Amino acid sequence: MCIFVVKFLQIWVFSRYLEAVNFPFRVFSRLSRLNFSKVKLRCTQFNFSRLAVHHCIFKVIKPKFFYILQWKRTHFLFFAFRALHSSCFTFYNKGMFTLLILADDLTGALDSGVQFAKNGITTSVFLRPPDQGLPWKQQILPEDAEVLVINTNTRHSKPEEAQLVIRHCMERYGAIPYKYKKTDSTLRGNIGAELAAFMESGGLERLPFAPAYPDLGRTTRGGIQFLRDKPIHQTEMAADPLNPVQESSIPCIIARQTRIPVTCFSAFPAGGEDGAGIMVFDCESNGEMAAIAAALHHRNLLHASAGCAGFAEALIRFLPFRRVPFPASSMMRHSPAPLLVISGSVNPVSLGQVRSAINSGIRAFPLAAEKLCEDAWFASAEAGAFVKQCSDALRLDGICLIGTNRALGTEVQTGQPAPAGVHEENISGRIGKLVPGILGETSVCIAVFGGDTLLGIMDALCFDYILPIREIKPGIVLALARGGTSEMFIVTKSGAFGGEELIAEIRDSLRCPSFYH
């Protein structure tokens, strides 16, 4: 055993040397394998030094010690191998990712990921970046996942913090052949900072950027972003309480956070050099989006690109996917289960949808933000009564709404400040602490508005990742949340998506038997 330890240390040092001289470790990616009877473990291709160690141990040391494993006294060594493997490496079940998507919020991660899932490409959405939340050994992905979507959760972060997260994700997953930086279609968040970090980490001289989403009325013309034919800073997005949009010029928005040059294209240049920096493409229809993707593919510029969910869908034709669909849709069964709608979004679009639902007779149960900030309140009798009220409404009416006073449009000013360390954007996420109690008393379907709220609910229910399945409407995602042995179907949407009657439309779709075929 001592000889083994010494040999391991020697090879560890040697692997570090190979990393320093940029040895091409990826050639070993499919050779690295440990197979003991029923135990099959494979390491990912996303960290070069770990690949080197894995290859050296299990291709150099393993053959020399294989005869030891025939002894009855090999149990300790066998479990030592397993412990070493699980503590030093990141795994997934099998297969290899083709595309990495980095999105700055969870609902954005889902509405981009579902573009691939609905086309038969298995897609997994991680709730957080690497090394945040659960240990990686608990975040095993489904077999044959081809698209990895990571919620960087940086929309409300400082630009410097957002850049650190993007760099970390790119370092961890730099070996994935295709990468996509998903941005908000109304240009909220740290657009310039994150695109800059994405380019720097990937060593990119140029980055194609197509932020249009024609299906939802988001178009780009002359480098200006429009929402339903109005510059976005002249729409309701200017009143967004967390990320108000004050500018519609894409080059100006990017220039606030980076000095990388920005060039706008009304059409792809016919020939010659494309120039360096961020390449912003005008687009007003799905046909134009497809033409942009085709031109970029012809020039071999699709290995790294950026945009919203609209351009993500246009990539499908040109990336080498295997198209092995995850069979989640086959598990869907028509069920008249009640619908619990949880709104944590204070976007004007979501407020209009909630107001329309309340006016149509759907009961709503608002919560004061001050109570959600108090950890002790969740164990109080008042919280228990709130859970029972919601359960009774679901049983009697088949649908109800819950959310903060502000998200439901019933805000009452108390003048009481939020506790230190609790920020406005994550107050809604604390609603998730109530959801297990409601689910414990009633079997329900849940629809969640807002990425912060969705993340809080996923944490409260101990889910690890989400598998998008299909769209109910553009931007409205049906997905399967999983954690351990538990799973649950959910409906999600960004706060700015959908029409005023959306809540009734979601309810009617889930109750319609044809929706499940």
Image (cartoon, grey):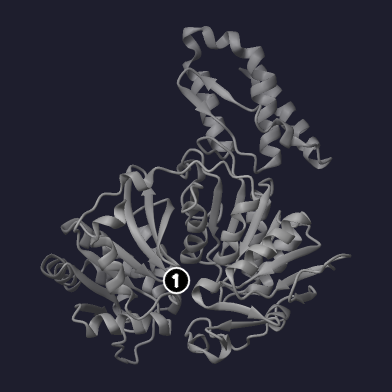
For the residue pair 100 and 51, the one nearer the viewer reads as 100
Seen in the image, is 446 located left or right of residue 253?
left
**Residue at the front extreme?**
287
The residue labelled by disc 1 is: 494
**Could you tell me which residue is drawn at 28 percent across and 56 percent down?**
514
Residue 214 against residue 222 in the figure, above or below: above
- Which percent across, then down, holds residue 124? 49, 50
Residue 164 in sight here: no
**What residue is shown at x 70% (from left), y 26% (from top)?**
56
Q: Is residue 69 above or below residue 447?
A: above
**Left or right: 330 in relation to 398:** right
Q: Splitting the image into 4 quarters, where does residue 310 fall?
A: bottom right
Residue kind at label 1, given as amino acid type = Ser
Residue at position x 16%, y 58% in the image: 441
Residue at (33, 48) in percent of width and height: 487
**372 versus 53 height, above or below:** below
Q: Position of residue 220 (x, y in %)?
A: 64, 78
